[in-house]
Image (cartoon, helix red, strand yellow):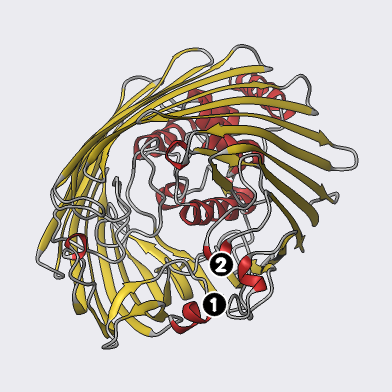
Amino acid sequence: MRLLLFLFFMLLASSLAAQKYDWDDFVEEYTSDVERAEEEDLQQHLLELKELSEHPLNINTATVEDLLQLPFLSEAQIEQIHAYIYLHGQMQTLAELRLVPLIDDATRRWIPLFMYAEPEQQETDKRLFSRLRHDFSTRLDIPLYYRVGQQQENGYRGDPLYHRIRYTLGNSRHFQAGLRVEKDAGERFYDSYGAYAMLHDVGILDKAVVGDYRIGFGEGLVIGGSTWNSKSTPPLKTQGGIRPMTGMDETNFLRGAAVMLALGNHIKLSAFGSYRKRDATLTNKGEVQTLRTDGYHRSASEWEKKRNVGSTVLGGNIAWYNKGFHLGATGYWQKFSRTLNPGSQQYRAIYPKGNAFGAVGMNYGYTRYRLSFAGEAAYSTAAGGWATINRASWNIGRNYILSAVQRFYAYQYYSFYSSALAENSNAQNESGVLVHLQAEPLAGLQVTAYADFFHHPWPRYRMTHSSTGQEFMLQGSYAISRRHTLLARYQLKRKENGDRMEPHHRVKLQWTCEPSKLWRFQTTGSFHEVLGSKGLMLSQNVRLVLPKPSLSFNGQLGYFNTDDYLSRIYVTQPSLYSSVSSASYYGHGMMGILTCRWQSKGGRWMVEGRYGMVRYFDREEQGTGLQRILSPWKNDLSVQTRIKL
């Protein structure tokens, strides 16, 4: 019987492999619900996932911590994978995931990009620096236009080119190192740089990083830089601990050292320290009015704000795990070399003041088969504020997941490194409840829905009083056949802005057709209406994959017509490898993008290019200030090369 099952799953795996579900398919499907994400956070998140896909895990030997790195796996699903292997022995093929009760169709499509099934005894090479692999990539963006900043004597200090270099060295398990340098358009020098070295699973040393890293514990209230949050995919597990900084983000990382020790099977102890210079806008007295996060040093005024305040951070975490339970405590202390004085405006009154800050928190969680719940309570010294978040998830059979998240962030609470589910960018001045449903009621039909109710007790920017709001989303994706898929999404968001309620209605309809293994067509219509202002966009995507010369083309052509900026349309665009690109359009015009990628046999060489175009019909120039372009056209060219040895 076991042999028959093995043969059946091998045939099934062969049929799935023939569909050639690849990284580009994953990025498009995984980010299909994302239209207004913080692009830097999403870029970093995808880079970390790409790093995992380059070094896949053996599902038969992967630990809980290993599986927690995959954001689409919930704690309940991880428990079920381990329970299946314990009861039935090691998996011979990933197709056996169909027998794991809580693994849905989407998760089964994604897992083979990050994992494989192989008997444990075949993994014999456990040397620290064995089988090292080199990965080098470089990207150059060439604008085929000039901005005003390039034409004025007191404008941008450097040329209009963007350039970055990334290099990583490591193996699949114990060692990894990397470096990065970047020059933004308009900058004179390569003024963004970083490097790291990491050891993993070496004796009691669970993980250690020297250089640039990101870190997150518990639910992210105190410090939460190791996950990416979205309402369409609410948090289903705790933060991922210590991770090296592999992306190009110039702001959201720590620089120094971090270590995590495994003290037996149930306790992990972590400590971290960091010192780095931050960009800031200073007052006439030399105090910090605003910490800058854009990373630009193009003009003389931006150059004056470059790395003019030092930041020292020390902290730690202790966590206990046992039979589905986990408890933890996190804290950090931070001191700036200058005093923070955000100003006297009403919305700035709750911003942190002084030069020394700290936050502490306690987190908990429990997972048992279909039920999972967790939470965290935190206290900050900035103004003596409290914050708490609690979540619960219930797997109603294989095809239904119901979850809820409650949050309360007092306006006195502030942590510089918090990253938790929130309507605003920070976990501050907000309370709310989110209810989320993920369902597959019929074969081929996937439904996602959520309702979020939130309140801001302190006046936000452009508000003179407390404010409230609601957000609702319903999305359905139905595979009519193996070649045709329909997607429909409706989103209503009611949020006060400028002392008035703004109801945003967004509709998206999408048809995807794959007539053969070579071609893929996707037609999308998007509509946005707010306060009588209407916006419409129609776009067509075409993808062609030629296996023999190993060439792929991805193109997008779109037409947009909106009444004004209020009804702008957000669009996810074709992008270069290991990245994501999005933009918003308003007014009347058209846009087009074409990417081309060549990959050598074995994947050692990759060369790709991207051409982007925008043409406005209702204006003769675009942008403002030094970014202004004196033409209705905007054309860009990007080239990227990658070498793996």
Front-most of 126 and 445?
Answer: 445
Front-most of 15 and 257?
Answer: 257
Q: State the image quarter where residue 36 is shown.
A: top left
- Please tell me whether residue 94 is drawn above or below residue 515 in the rendered image: below
- Give the secondary structure at mark 1: loop
Q: State the image quarter where residue 533 is shown.
A: top left
Residue 626: image tag: 2
Q: Classify the position of the C terminus by image quarter.
A: bottom right
- Mark 2: amino acid: Leu
Q: State the image quarter where residue 18 is shown.
A: top right
Which residue sits furthest left?
384
Q: How many marks?
A: 2
Q: Classify the position of the N terminus by image quarter.
A: top right
Percent x, y of residue 208? 44, 72
- Please tell me whether residue 418 is drawn above or below residue 619 in the rendered image: below
Point 14% across, 70% down: residue = 381
Cα–Cα span, label 1 and label 2: 9 Å
Residue 117 visible (yes or no)? no
Point 38% across, 64% down: residue = 215
Q: Residue at label 1?
A: 299
Tag 1 near tag 2, CB within 8 Å:
yes
